[in-house]
Image: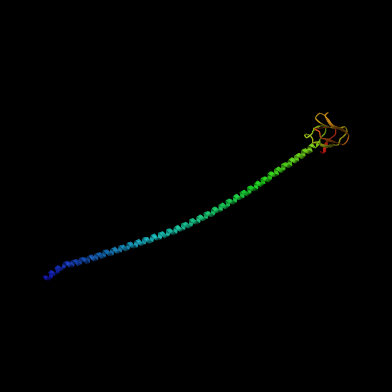
Amino acid sequence: MEKYRGWVRSRPILWSVGIFLVALIIGGAIMGSSNGSLEDENSKLEEQVDNAQADRDDAEAETEEAEAEAQEVKDERGQIIAGAEDEAAKIVGDAKAEAEELQNVRGEVKSAKSELANIEDSINGAEEVAAKSVIPGNGTFRAEVDFIPGTYQSSGGSGCYWATLNSADPYDIASNENASGQTIASIQTPYFQTEDCGKWKRIGD
């Protein structure tokens, strides 16, 4: 009986020890479970960090590639612009050169036209002088209009009469002559009259 009582007295201690051991086991299990969860979480976090790092590296690589492509495009654009500017400058230079050449040609044409006009004037003047250096046939002729004053010669002929006149009046005579052959008259008066002397040609001033 005493033995039984001793066991009864020790039973609370055993229960306490048992409960403690169970608590240790459960606590260990919980701790083990918690440690496993923490390790899993740490692994996941590390994996996410690694993935994020990889994504960042990829983004940096893509950024560098994009920047390189952008620089290449910029350089190419600069080359195109420079080439276009050079071509435009060449076109402008050629246009200016052509404009200057055209201006020179126009100047030469203008000069040629002026020279031609002078030649034509000279020809016209020469033709006028030539035309007015001849007194044709019979009649009364006016100086500078019908003839140029000067020394004239005619073949004369039977009944040839000529007279230099101070006016259109046939009786306002400065000098006259009846000639049967070749004759010469110095005509410096405003008018000249001739009959049956043929054509008069100017032979001098």
What residue is shown at x 11% (from left), y 70% (from top)?
2
Q: Tell me residue 94's x, y (percent).
A: 61, 50
**Count of labels in the image:** 0
Q: Tell me residue 21's x, y (percent).
A: 22, 67
Is residue 82 shown left or right of residue 167? left
Extreme residue toward the bottom, this view = 3
Q: Is residue 54 above or below residue 141?
A: below
Q: Tell me residue 55's x, y (percent).
A: 40, 59
What residue is shown at x 56% (from left), y 52% (from top)?
85
Residue 23 placement: quadrant: bottom left
Is residue 13 shown left or right of residue 147? left
Residue 42 placement: quadrant: bottom left
Residue 22 placement: quadrant: bottom left
Q: Is residue 171 above or below residue 33?
A: above
What residue is shown at x 21% (from left), y 66% (from top)?
20
Is residue 54 shown left or right of residue 180? left
Q: Is residue 44 above or below residue 182?
A: below
Taking depth in this image into account, of 23 and 114 the one nearest to the observer is 114
Q: Is residue 161 visible?
A: no
Taking depth in this image into account, of 74 and 44 the one nearest to the observer is 74
User: Where is the C terminus found, in terms of image quarters?
Assistant: top right
What residue is shown at x 25% (from left), y 64% (from top)?
27
Q: Tell me residue 14's x, y (percent).
A: 18, 68
Q: How is the image coloured?
A: rainbow
Q: Is residue 118 visible?
A: yes
User: Where is the N terminus found, in terms of image quarters?
Assistant: bottom left
Extreme residue toward the left, this view = 1
